[in-house]
Image: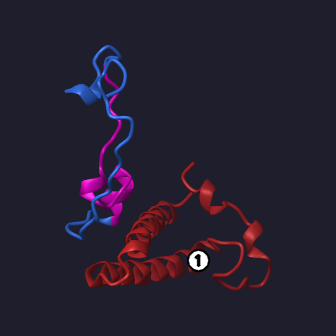
Amino acid sequence: MIGPYKMRLARAYIPFQRYGQVWSPAEGLRRGTIFPELFSPYIPRDKGSCGTCQ
Amino acid sequence: MQNEQMELMQRLRELEFAAVELNLFLDTHPENQEALRDFNRVACELAEVRQTYENKFGPTMNFGVSTSKGRWQWIDGPWPWQVGY
């Protein structure tokens, strides 16, 4: 474990994406992806709290 | 700028975005028939919308898509990236 937030040095994995529901072209362009499972907009948070520890 | 031009260009942008998304998925899932079906649908509609746009408002690309009638139409503005901005 490394550093004050007790995080592993590196552990990457990518589960294989399945083809499920997809948004329409119009919706997809608005959201930045046609795949709901990949939609994750950046939401700025207070710097104090550590997002990964929750 | 005509409203119809803006609407057609918006549709073109939406379809091109969806085509890229499906392209990226199919790169790693080339056997997926549902994704392939959706890609082919988008590709068809994209070609139709592009044709409709170009018939009325001129080329959407400088080469590789359509011929230029009467004069070199590419320089007759607005260029695609200027539409709506």
Q: Residue at x 66, y 61 (%)?
A: B79
Q: Judge whether residue A34 is colored magenta.
A: yes
Query: From the viewer's perspective, is residue A10 above or below residue A49?
Result: below
Horizontal and vertical percent position of residue B4: 47, 65
Q: Is residue B65 left or right of residue A24?
A: right
The hue in which chain B appears in the rendered picture of the protein? red
Q: Residue at x 26, y 81 (%)?
A: B34
Residue tagged 1:
B54
User: Quick one: quadrant of the N terminus of chain A?
Assistant: top left
Horizontal and vertical percent position of residue B80: 61, 62
The hue in which chain A appears in the rendered picture of the protein? blue
- Residue type marked 1: Glu
Q: Nearer the viewer, residue B70 or B65?
A: B65
Going by the picture, which residue comes out furthest to the right? B71
Q: Is residue A39 left or right of residue B1?
A: left
Q: Judge whether residue A50 is colored magenta.
A: no
Horizontal and vertical percent position of residue B19: 43, 71
Query: From the viewer's perspective, is residue B40 above or below residue B15?
Result: below
The stretch in magenta equals A25-45
Q: Nearer the viewer, residue A9 or B5?
A: A9
Query: From the viewer's perspective, is residue A19 above or below residue A47?
Result: below
Q: Is residue B61 left or right of residue B47?
A: right
Q: How many marks?
A: 1
Q: Quadrant of residue A54?
A: top left
Q: Residue at x 43, y 68 (%)?
A: B24
Q: Is residue B8 left or right of residue B36?
A: right
Q: Nearer the viewer, residue A48 or A22?
A: A48
Going by the picture, which residue comes out furthest to the top? A48
Horizontal and vertical percent position of residue A7: 31, 30
